[in-house]
Amino acid sequence: MGRVYNFSAGPAVLPEEVLQEIAAEMMDYHGTGMSVMEMSHRSGAFDEIIQTAEQDFRDLLQVPDSYKVLFLQGGAHLQFAAVPMNLMKNRTADYIVTGQWAKRAYMEAQKYGKVNKIASSEDKTYSYIPDCSDLPISKDADYVYICENNTIYGTKFKTLPNTKGKDLVSDVSSCFLSEPMDVSRYAVLYGGVQKNIGPAGMVIAVVRDDLITDDVLPGTPDIMKYKTQADAGSLYNTPNCFCIYVCGKVFKWLKKLGGMEVMKQRNEEKAAILYDFLDSSTMFQGTVRREDRSLMNVPFVTGDKELDAKFVKEAEAAGLVNLKGHRSVGGMRASIYNAMPRAGVEALITFMKKFEEENS
Ligand SMILES: *Cc1c(COP(=O)(O)O)cnc(C)c1O
């Protein structure tokens, strides 16, 4: 069987060009006689890989010099704890809960201090982003936390919350490198790379320099201190070398395509054709308030569970896979990350039209 169109939310589709390069370098990376999986993280070859990856990432997002870029393990979940452990000087933080991942982070942070839920969209199954222009930000809050793109529900913050001068922390796992970002507006932003960048098992955290300190909560493991990781150049312990290597290839691919402005345009075009179809369809409906729609994750339903299941099954047989919605919401979800070609979205729409004709 050949390649399919993979609409998985994560781990997710990677650029074919990148996969082919990796395959070609598998037995002998640049004359070293070994694959990147087999080499020391202290070797010259790997040093070049990680340095280049960091520089390309910085170039893509125009990361200011006053921020560190860290390649960390433990997934986004470990950051749910690392953020309060490193940032909660007053043991207080404000969380905006727009979905399951934000809720997980909010629950985890409660182990470390007083955590306020200052806004939520739980009342309507997280199908919108609440108005965050004038929230009751706590006077002593160490930070305000958001999940910027809600992978499961398909919503995205189109404007960042007004934090009234407090530091903003953002989980950008599922919109990482999908469009330009103004890094200077964040204290910390981080994302698991398995959504829009690379293989599972790594997080990239971008942390403002003044937050990289020994002043962390008592009991914080050394490995979770941003300072430990920053001082060691993300090589405090053995990092996920292979993942850093693949991410580095994806950064080169993104640069070659033209960088973040071009990706934004491509992603907007891909999302627009799918949302336009959903808006005109009599069978399928999007589940998210129009102005809050994600460019990356597009949930939709027929309104009939059996028909949803039939759709997912028949789509899979047609080579359009992983379209089942998250188990907490049902229906369908098409994740259309950077590496999903426009042709994949077009194939999905063609299939949906055919399914609609056959089943109505
Ligand atoms: C997938 C996802 C997570 C969880 O990532 P892990 O790497 O499995 O910990 C957290 N936040 C968001 C926004 C996600 O999409």
Image (cartoon, grey):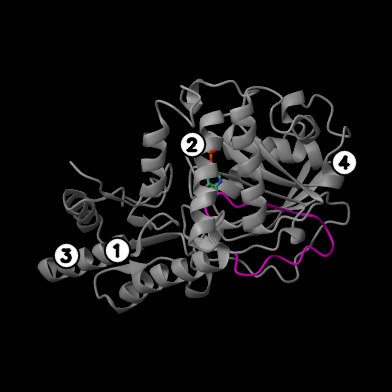
Span highlighted in magenta in the image: 157-174
**Earlier along the polypeptide chain: callout 2 or callout 1?**
2
**Mark with earlier residue (3, 1):** 1
Q: Is residue 182 left or right of residue 33?
A: right
Residue type at the position of mark 3: Phe
Instruction: Residue at 45%, 68% (x, y): give it.
Output: 266
293 w.r.t. 194: above or below: below
Q: Which mark is residue 343?
A: 1
The residue tagged 4 is: 89
Residue 300 visible in this rendered orientation of the protein: yes
Q: CA distance from mark 3 to mark 1?
A: 18 Å
- Foreground mark, 2 or 1, reads 1
Q: Residues within 10 Å of mark 4 (few under 14, many from 20)?
A: some
The image shows residue 217, relative to residue 12, as above or below, that is above
Spatial separation of the CA atoms under disc 4 and disc 2: 31 Å
Q: Which residue type carries mark 1?
A: Ala
Q: Earlier in the sequence, mark 4 or mark 2?
A: 4
